[in-house]
Image (cartoon, grey):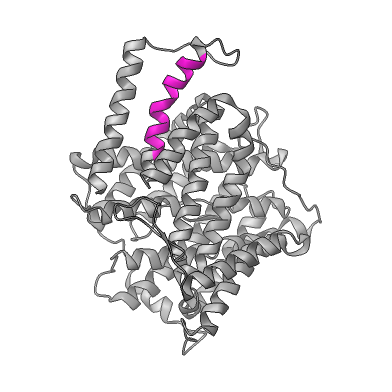
Amino acid sequence: MVNTKVEVHTRRPLGTSVIPGFTGLIATVWLVPFVAQFLVQGGVRLPGMGETESLMALTAISVMLCALGTIIHGAVTNRPEVLAPGVVPLFYMLSLHNRSFEPVSWGEIFGLSFVASLAFVVLAMCGGLVKIAKAMPTALKEALFYSIGLFLMLQALKAGGLLTAGARGEFFGVLSLSRESVCFLIGCGAIFLCGELRRVRNSAILVGVVAAALAAFVLGLTTWPAALFSVQPFVELTRNVSPTSFTLPGLHLLDEAVVFLVLLVVDVVATYEIVSSISPSLQAEDKTPRRGRLAQSILGLQMLISSFFSTATQIVTFESTSVVAAGGRDRRSAFVTGGLYLLLLFILPLIALFPVYACAPALFAVGYAIHKATFRFMTHDRQARYLLIPALFGCLILGSMSLAVLLMLAALPLVQLKLWKSGDPGSRGPLFSRKLLVSATVALLCLALIAKMGMQ
């Protein structure tokens, strides 16, 4: 991965625990209301609860998973990353549920999350993920992560009400200006303005979300909650502390499970590498993430747990780069972030002030940061430039992150073959016969087309 140059603050000892831990909360807290509201709007309801009660309970469950997941991950691995429900898994879940051709029920979707997480754990514990990370070409890693950043920016534009998708899901829709989209633009402006100011750079995402929420309140889109401090979320959490039942998917959903696993592997492997590239102390001697196999295994187990509680699959967040940039290097930062998340359980009624479009600026900022970190490499590497074509086609034309991944995997062997035949000094010959190479590529392309047809 490309070593991103991030300014590192080295204040000791406070800067190695409290400040980075607080930064981790500031950078990731928007994920909790964003994911919970998207799930509820998508039709997720907890047993015996309506929309409002399900939203409060899902928010409380997500906060608990963030807190305990971050603390456990830090305690075992001595790393500072923050764990939270993943946005990429969330949108893949929503795409499965909302497709018009054989939509997948939420019970089966959470079952797919369980199966993909179980496969992730097996790969992590046997060292398969480490081998995949080492064997995966750098150009493919960058292209995959670039497509994630582009996809998140486009989803943020939709969530912010600024872009309406086309009739078939493509992103060539209609620009719309409403009160919600004005709040979104105000939040984005605040984030990028604070990003230019050194003293508040690490708080830019929180400032942007708060600015968008204040704009929504002033415009009359939201109302102040009746009670700011409440123990009701604890009651809702207690009522749903037992795992939510899910349905194990049938063989007809095998391809969706494979795509789910690929998305998790790509997202997690790339995030660990980018976070570790900021500080040499987080890297092993071979430049791979320190204790990467152990960290991936612990994360996989927490993915399994999250699939039982009707929320998006829990992953390591890209926003963890802010923690490392603020000086976080070990478990102490994770402990501070996790402890602060637990305190949020007392002020969950504030969730009403942070609708989806107010949190969307944070999603756009994260996508832009990923895009910026990888774009320079994408434009200077010949192989990556070729992979940029299927990445853009999958995200912009087809409107699907999973299809973009399939297209890039299908295109990689052909790109390597073309560069090898053209005498490119940095390329290597094909590992398999030309017929097998073409057959595998055609099979992946057919799978992508079938998946696209299923989304219509």
Task: Kindly give the residue lying farthest to the bottom in the view shown.
Answer: 226
Instruction: Using the image, determine if residue 142 lies above or below residue 235.
Output: above
Q: Main secondary structure of the magenta part?
A: helix
Judge left or right: residue 218 versus residue 286.
left
The image quarter containing residue 189 is bottom right
Instruction: Using the image, determine if residue 433 lies above or below residue 381.
Output: above
Residue at 33% over, 17% down: 438
Residue 52 image point, x, y percent: 34, 78
Image quarter hosting the N terminus: top right
Q: How many marks?
A: 0
Residue 378 image point, x, y percent: 58, 34
Judge left or right: residue 331 versus residue 257.
right
Task: Kindly give the residue lying farthest to the right in the view shown.
Answer: 11
Q: Which stretch is magenta?
A: 404-419
Residue at 33% over, 67% down: 41
Residue 137 image point, x, y percent: 53, 26
312 within the magenta span: no
The image quarter containing residue 242 is bottom left
Residue at 52% over, 84% down: 229
Give whichever of 297, 423 is nearer the camera.
423
Residue 273 appears in the figure: yes
413 within the magenta span: yes
Residue at 53% over, 72% down: 183
Instruction: Using the image, determine if residue 411 lies above or below residue 252.
Output: above
Judge left or right: residue 228 versus residue 238.
right
Judge left or right: residue 176 versus residue 292.
left
Give whichever of 61, 371 is nearer the camera.
371
Give whichever of 397, 127 is nearer the camera.
397
Residue 237 appears in the figure: no
Residue 341 image point, x, y percent: 55, 67
